[in-house]
Image (spheres, coloured by chain):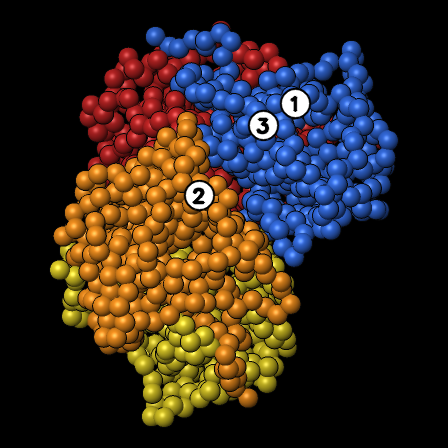
Chain colours: A orange, B yellow, C blue, D red
Amino acid sequence: MTYRFEPDRIYRMPTHFGPAPGPRQMPEGIATDSKRSPRRLSVAASFLTDGALLERHLPEGFALAGEPVVTVEFHHMTDIDWLAGRGYTMIWVSWPVTFTGRQDRASGRFLAVVWENLADPIITGRCEIGHPKLYAEISEPRSCEGAQICNAGWMGFRFLDMTVSNLRNEQPAPKPPSDGTLMLKYVPRTGTWGESELQQVTLSPPADPDMTIERQQTGRGAVRFHKSTWSNLPTMYHVVNALAELPVIEPRGGSLTVSRGGKTYRDQRVLI
Amino acid sequence: MTYRFEPDRIYRMPTHFGPAPGPRQMPEGIATDSKRSPRRLSVAASFLTDGALLERHLPEGFALAGEPVVTVEFHHMTDIDWLAGRGYTMIWVSWPVTFTGRQDRASGRFLAVVWENLADPIITGRCEIGHPKLYAEISEPRSCEGAQICNAGWMGFRFLDMTVSNLRNEQPAPKPPSDGTLMLKYVPRTGTWGESELQQVTLSPPADPDMTIERQQTGRGAVRFHKSTWSNLPTMYHVVNALAELPVIEPRGGSLTVSRGGKTYRDQRVLI
Amino acid sequence: MTYRFEPDRIYRMPTHFGPAPGPRQMPEGIATDSKRSPRRLSVAASFLTDGALLERHLPEGFALAGEPVVTVEFHHMTDIDWLAGRGYTMIWVSWPVTFTGRQDRASGRFLAVVWENLADPIITGRCEIGHPKLYAEISEPRSCEGAQICNAGWMGFRFLDMTVSNLRNEQPAPKPPSDGTLMLKYVPRTGTWGESELQQVTLSPPADPDMTIERQQTGRGAVRFHKSTWSNLPTMYHVVNALAELPVIEPRGGSLTVSRGGKTYRDQRVLI
Amino acid sequence: MTYRFEPDRIYRMPTHFGPAPGPRQMPEGIATDSKRSPRRLSVAASFLTDGALLERHLPEGFALAGEPVVTVEFHHMTDIDWLAGRGYTMIWVSWPVTFTGRQDRASGRFLAVVWENLADPIITGRCEIGHPKLYAEISEPRSCEGAQICNAGWMGFRFLDMTVSNLRNEQPAPKPPSDGTLMLKYVPRTGTWGESELQQVTLSPPADPDMTIERQQTGRGAVRFHKSTWSNLPTMYHVVNALAELPVIEPRGGSLTVSRGGKTYRDQRVLI
């Protein structure tokens, strides 16, 4: 007898061995505590750039909202329950937008690209959420001579340096009200090259009630993407070079946040 | 102005920075030679198992064809043109099946799971082809005391050992006629957890005219999957344990193949 | 003009480019604070074993002192000043001894072997201190289902599993008075194979005034070394197998310690 | 009973578990064939530089011989018998010298620094031979757009790029007669910081009768060391920066060599 998909269970390729354990589907009998897991060290920096350039990297239905400020965040996470206590690091690149769909409207931040240093959350995040995740070698953020230093590369080519210096115990300015984080889930069509099976805008609502901020500092941020040849980054030089071309017109501050707990994006939804 | 998708170009998440370079879409001006790239060392071993158990890991529309023989192949590839000369290693697990769709029928091998030690081809293969790829740490096959030794793990837990010993210069038995390699492309639905956006059978036709076999040996194969706890393999213990439960009723030989050149799966197509 | 060695400066191979920066010699102008660096998560477990077996792994001049209890410690260190804020993990294996030299006598713990997951401190520690360091892939200790889980391997072969469970906020029993940690520095003679250039006992005195313990828990420890073939661990199967042969007669507790600050072993000295 | 050192057997720290398996001491019963192991892909490039600068990196007793030409070689080795069939990559940096000791005289190449991407041969080579080995992340040399591309980094900071292009099937010019490869073995004194236990010149004689060259090409070489801060390379910025300061006055060609077999440096000896 061949297998049947069990109803209401999340599957991922390969689907043939049963429902897939992951962030949004823990095995039975494993206790989780989203108030304690994960632990997270976040380092962020922003810069004002050229809005016209930025707009070229927005899909249809989106428009820039307010100032064209790009934010780069490193999230070093440990004690992740669905990885049985292991951790990984992710990088988010975003800017403020509004989305106008056939039916839905939302304003928030547009998550343009994510890099992570572990394949497993890349696989789950791309399929299940629409997170535009790529792989990078990402150093654990380190503290050196008073600054927080972050960087990322691929096969030894460092494409991103970020530093937040002059850190002081001060809360960052409150974030403007937002409907959440917006992204584009896209699946190409096999065989009919150039067409897609799926193009949909998905939204992470802003609420994250189980997340507790334990420490927060602000400082001076500096972000630099390094232009690459095809030979150095053959699967993503186009992504890195587009970001490297954005001029840093003005730095817009940096921050360090230590937090605990957080949601699993079970509240992610499709906008129409 | 927001961007428009260029027609006839392959995109992947994030789509916002232009068409995506990859195995099926090389940048302009980069010469490729599919008769020379990649170089490949393949080590394979097969075993007879319990057909009833195997059938539980087949999706609807599939049936076992002939003897229930599982084949595990390690493909260590170097000189890959779309990675600018770099390489990686993949593991294929398959068994013989027939597929009966609403319209199409095919017999060949069912590609149940693939592991690779590089995230980039995992991302391209899952989206574009429907390859059921997961990440593993995979050692380069090594030769030791007359045997070819292969293994794979995740975060230091070794879940697969394979050895081919007694290698002699002898061609393996010719493969039976086949319509190619069959797999299930599956994309979960965001937000409506438990439903899918896409479930389709895709097929790699068997022809690979640019591939040249340079050396071939046969030997005695031994395969062992190691049972795992959730804690050791939290994202795929269910896959590994299902394979570890398949009894090795009889080893069915092993082989070593050195080859050069190969196709990019642009001929992959959907069966209905 | 060829170079001259500058007096009172520490050198390491290659010596040709000037004095070597490292834990015991920071570059000028770099501020350090040994009260804050490094941060350390230590997980330890002990077991009673067979004294006669243990004694076979003691060099001349040493004798077991008290009960034959082996202690295995994982030290996950971050924020290390001499690595510009980076970190690494080390494993110490030790048991209680007395040393009687021609002139010196000391009692303390015998550091039989150290594994680290970074080559740089292996190089500095072996040459400068006499630390018997080898390389291993070491996972960051993780917390899973109420236990602290640690393991180590080499090229995908896991040779050591350690778990400390039932953790409760309780200080471990005070350590007996000790003259410090004892080890054997050994340098083979080039060309005259089988002879040595140097065999000397070195001692780390116990004082570590800049180290502050921030949190301490005790629990139930479990240690397991896995027997290996030469093929799996060709450079150290003899070390791992000797430890795997030690029977665990009785577990002797485990602990978790979070601390900050520490010394650089500038106080290391040779016993005669 | 404590252990005694067995006569005529090579030991390394930790010495307490018996003689140490390694390149110069294989376990009993393991067959080796130095005519077949290792397999080696070597890529080399040379450049003329400023002799006065180069001389500053020579120890007492050495003098430049002939033109001040620095050669950088990448050796990617696989099928290494003493690693049970595994491989690793090393980088050699050398220039021509004569050595005049109290008793011995030799002319050959001075091996100024070696980088390797595996800790085990770093440990054996430093102790037993006097190889000035450091750790680096080293990519497998790759072929891209007609050139051979090599690079090395540490924790994501790439400090060395080397390319050999325009490769043609032509043997490189024969090497001048040489007494071999010269290096300085140095061991610091524990506790008496700034003094040494051992400073001796060691020599690898040039003969390597079991090595067979299978393929040889010559081309145009380009070498570039990248200047580093302490923060990027805290244990070896002084080495890399000294090499980065050497001007490339003129490139002196490059080569690619595929070979098989080789010696274990059992013929290494000390010069006086």
Answer with left or right where residue D87 lies relative to residue B259: right
- Which element is circle 3 on? loop
Q: Are marks 1 and 2 in contact (CB under 8 Å)?
A: no
Subunit bearing disc 1: C
**Image quadrant where residue B189 sits:** bottom left
Dot 1: within a 10 Å radius of its alpha carbon, few (fewer than 14), some, or many (20 or more) residues? some
For marks 3 and 2, give the CA distance: 23 Å
Above or below — where is D135 with respect to B144? Answer: above
**Image quadrant where residue D223 sits:** top left
**Image quadrant where residue D256 sits:** top left
Amino acid at dot 3:
Gly
- Which element is circle 1 on? loop
Q: Look at 25% across and 17% down and name the residue there.
A: D50
Question: Which residue is the site of mark 3?
Answer: C261
Q: Nearer the viewer, mark 3 or mark 2?
A: 2
Dot 2: within a 10 Å radius of its alpha carbon, few (fewer than 14), some, or many (20 or more) residues? some
* Residue under disc 1 on the same chain as residue under disc 2: no
Amino acid at dot 2:
Thr
Subunit bearing disc 3: C
Amino acid at dot 1:
Asp
Question: Which residue is the site of mark 2?
Answer: A257
Above or below — where is B32 with respect to D259? Answer: below
Q: Look at 39% across and 33% down and name the residue there.
A: A167
Above or below — where is D181 with respect to C146? Answer: above
What percent of the width, then of the height, locates residue D127? Answer: 56, 27
Answer with left or right where residue D19 lies relative to residue D95: right
